[in-house]
Amino acid sequence: MTVRYGISLIPEPVFTSRVYRLRQLVCGQYGAWAAEMEMLHMPLIPYFDSSEEGISNISIGLERISAESQKNSLRFPLVSRGVGHMLENCDDIFLEFTVAEDPIDRGQRHLQKLWWKILELVESTSGTVIPDINILKSDYKPYIYLMKHANLSDSVFLSAVTFAENVIRDLNIPNSTKAWQLQLIRFESNSDIESWNKGGWVSDLRWRVLESYSL
């Protein structure tokens, strides 16, 4: 059995419920269930390895970070750019969120600052390993996945993207929401480490929310 941990941001419940329905329709229409094996969440630090002592220390740090976030910007805004996908593969479709490039854009800066603080916390915690951390640092993109590890043909994948774009309009999903909670999550799968990194957890992923922290 392989155990991994994750830290995720959860948007407001009303927004989350609508996007959950969107994800359900996209996965069901195209028979790609990997994204549905997880809760509806925005991964901040996905699938990292840690000792139990490390997780305990991370939990304490997350409590401090969430308290600071509440003090500085209670329920800060999240702005969606709509449905996105990776051009180089036919696996993933997601709801993409903006990260501020303008230094005066205070609202979106809060998401980026929160992510950096959490990354520094996890990276500095003894007994913790973040896979592909350099890639994560250089190319952070906040997503909520609607489809993962789909392995569709080009034409079917483009059909799925178009389907998602139309359904998001039909469900009247707004392009903005607010941050609600951070969650520390434990994931388990019978897949080995090598197959985990290739999506081997798809058939039997189990997860448990260890802690929630209000934002």
Image (tube, grey):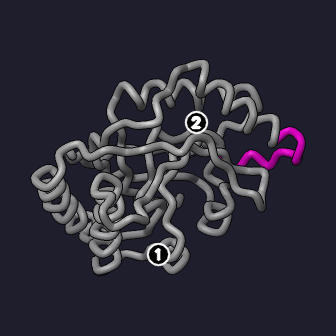
User: Is residue 104 positioned above or below 203 on the image?
Assistant: below
- Disc marking residue 137: 1
Give the left or right position of residue 143, taking residue 72 as reference: right
The residue that disc 2 covers is: 36
Q: Residue 89: which quarter of the image?
A: bottom right
Identity of the residue drawn at 21% across and 60% down? 62
**Magenta segment, which residues?**
148-157
Q: For residue 93, what is the image quadrant?
A: top right
Residue drawn at x 51%, y 80% as measured from the top left: 134
**Number of numbered discs overlaid on the protein picture:** 2
- What amino acid is labelled 2 in the image? Glu
Three-letter amino acid code of the residue under disc 1: Lys
Q: Nearer the viewer, residue 103 or 51?
A: 103
Give whichever of 50, 173 is nearer the camera: 173
In this view, the residue in front, 29 or 184, is 29
Looking at the image, tell me whether mark 2 or mark 1 is earlier in sequence order: 2
Q: Residues within 10 Å of mark 2 (few under 14, many from 20)?
A: some
Residue 131 lies left or right of residue 74; in this view the side is right
Element type at mark 2: helix
Q: Secondary structure at mark 1?
A: helix
Residue beneath the point at 35% across and 55% down: 108
Left/right placement of residue 162 relative to residue 137 reads right
Q: Is residue 94 magenta?
A: no
Decide which of 129, 173 is in the foreground and name it. 173
**How far from the left and from the top, in percent, is residue 187?**
45, 52
